[in-house]
Image (cartoon, helix red, strand yellow):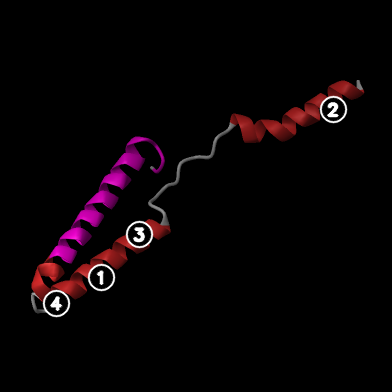
Amino acid sequence: MKIATLLLAVVILVAPTTLFSNPPQTDVPAEVSAAQSALKGAYNDLQHAGGEWGGHRVKAMQHIQEALSELSEAEKYAREHHDIK
């Protein structure tokens, strides 16, 4: 009887962590949203900075657009693979 009670207690304590996985996040993590906002702000700042800077300002703006595109693709992937809803 004591062994059965002990086994039942172990199953009750262990089952929730092994049988049920964590549900996916419901939205994009706050850190990703903050990064997107920072990138958009940097793009806007560079857009209004003026001057050509030897073409480097425009190149930096292109890199920011590429980063935003990658984050968008990452979100799409996460939704398709149920990492987020």
Question: Pointer 1: residues within 10 angstroms few (<14), some, or many (20+)?
Answer: few
- Name the kind of residue labelled 1 in the image: Gly
Circle 1 — which element? helix
* Among numbered discs 2 and 1, the one appearing first in the sequence: 2
Q: Which mark is residue 6?
A: 2
Q: Which residues are magenta?
A: 59-84
Give, as a three-letter code, the residue at label 4: His
Q: Nearer the viewer, mark 2 or mark 1?
A: 1
Quarter of the rendering occupied by the N terminus = top right
Q: Label for residue 48?
A: 4
Q: Is residue 2 above or below residue 16?
A: above
List the residue tagged with mark 3. 33
Residue 2 placement, left or right of 55: right
Q: Which secondary structure, mark 2?
A: helix
Q: Residue at x 77, y 30 (%)?
A: 10
N-terminal of the two: label 1 or label 3? Answer: 3
* Residue at 42% over, 47% down: 26
Q: Is residue 85 above or below residue 34?
A: above
**Which is more N-terminal, label 4 or label 3?**
3
**Residue 9 in magenta?**
no
